[in-house]
Image (cartoon, helix red, strand yellow):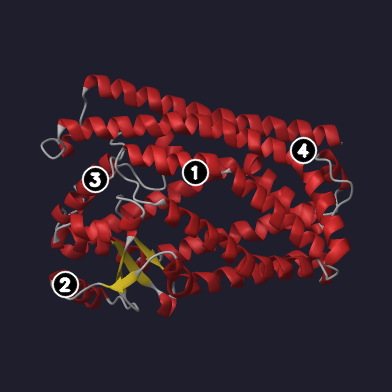
Amino acid sequence: METVILDLFLALFALEFIVEFGLNELNLDYVRRRSASKEIPDFFQGKLSPEEYDQSIQYTLAKGRFQRWAEIYGRVVTLIVLFGALPLVDRFSEKLASWSLPFPHARGLIFCFAVALLLSIASLPTDLYSTFKLEARFGFNKTTWKLYLTDKIKGLMLGIVIGLPFLFVVLWLMDATGSYWWIWTFFFIAGFQLLMVMAYPALIAPLFNKFEPLPEGELRSRILRLADDVGFKTNGIFSMDGSKRSAHSNAYFTGIGKAKRIVLFDTLIAQMTVDQGLAVLAHEIGHYKLKHIRRMLFVQTLFLFFGLYILSLLVNYRPLFSAFGLENPSNHGALVLFSLLSGPFSFYLGPLINRLSRKHEYEADRFAVKTLHSSGPMEEALVKLTIKNLANLMPHPWYSAYHYSHPTPTERVQAIRTVSV
């Protein structure tokens, strides 16, 4: 049976790689041919200089070439962990737990933490190249080595302070609540995720960035008036110092209930006119008013429920463990194996989630246009964001359908122009 499991995994693993790698190559060829024809969408004519257009092409091609090798590297790392490192880490965690850490689930905590640390270390080469070479080459990276190391240390500390207690409870529930452990674990994880959504804006995000209430002025007053007009209540609209890490600009909505807030990158505030900034805010408010946040949380919770149920069927299935060199079934082994193996078995679900996300983006754009009674500011904001971020104006349709959580800039502008105001 171990052979069947390995053959099935390797077949799906190879299929996922072929799809990912093939789509990237398809997109690279598509962008090269578009570059040769000097084809610029009508919406960007007169707004995008030839130099900016060439930069966006070169940035897209550079990212695609990097992704080609990052994909191969990531696959090799996964295979090394699955077929070599797991048994070694399991034996190490067993010995360490028996020698000096005689408390419940010590072995499981050590095992999961060690695998996570191993994967994190393995990801450093691609992360470093992306940050300090690729992004720096095109003028986006503002991260210093000191800030980069500080971020990594903070992330590690959060993993210890929050991640280890969370993992301990999961392992305890798996061990103490019988055959229906997965239901109890589901409620715990769902509640924990909800708690983190509420805690993140005020407790975790400020560890990495500085958040300040949007200063007094025309933009703030018009935003508050807009929020009042559409019945949107929030604990604040904040500016975030995104410029200390990157020149990219963005805005996002975070939190739920009384903890919800809208965050604008300082780079976005500097780039936008008041009308354009108001359109971006109207778009973010639209996500909340149209219940997109709740919908996505529901979808994620549904995946969690079915994922835990499937895990409950496999947690004591000995051939699964022996196929990857683990001598005996264990709860901690099941958690790690499931996280590493789930990708090849579920990668086709990604485009479905992205399709729902793109639907939400169209709806939020439409909300912004109707709320402001004009399509101009939203279109101008999108065009400016696209130019400043050197976004790919026209990716290959298959590539964008598979990877993009947002419609392409051209698709969004086309849709905005059809909205009646």
Relative height, residue 139 to residue 242 (above, below): above
Provide the secondary structure element on which disc 1 rests: helix
Give the number of the mark in front: 2 or 4.
4
Q: Which of 328 and 209 is in front in this view?
A: 209
Q: Can see residue 417?
A: yes
Q: Where is residue 375 in the image (x, y as percent from the top left)?
A: 16, 54
CA neighbours of label 4 inside 10 A, class few (<14), some (14 to 19), many (20+): few
Q: Which amino acid does label 1 sit on?
A: Asp
Give the number of the mark in front: 2 or 1.
1
Q: Residue 182 carries which label?
A: none
Q: From the image, tell me which residue sits under label 3.
A: 388
Left or right, residue 147 beside residue 116: left
Q: Position of residue 360 (x, y in %)?
A: 38, 55
Q: Which amino acid does label 3 sit on?
A: Lys
Q: From the image, tell me which residue sits under label 2.
A: 222
Determine the image quadrant of residue 122: top right
Q: What residue type is labelled 2?
A: Arg
Q: From the image, tell me which residue sits under label 1.
A: 127
Instruction: Give the mark nearer the N terminus: 2 vs 3.
Output: 2
Q: From the image, tell me which residue sits under label 4.
A: 84
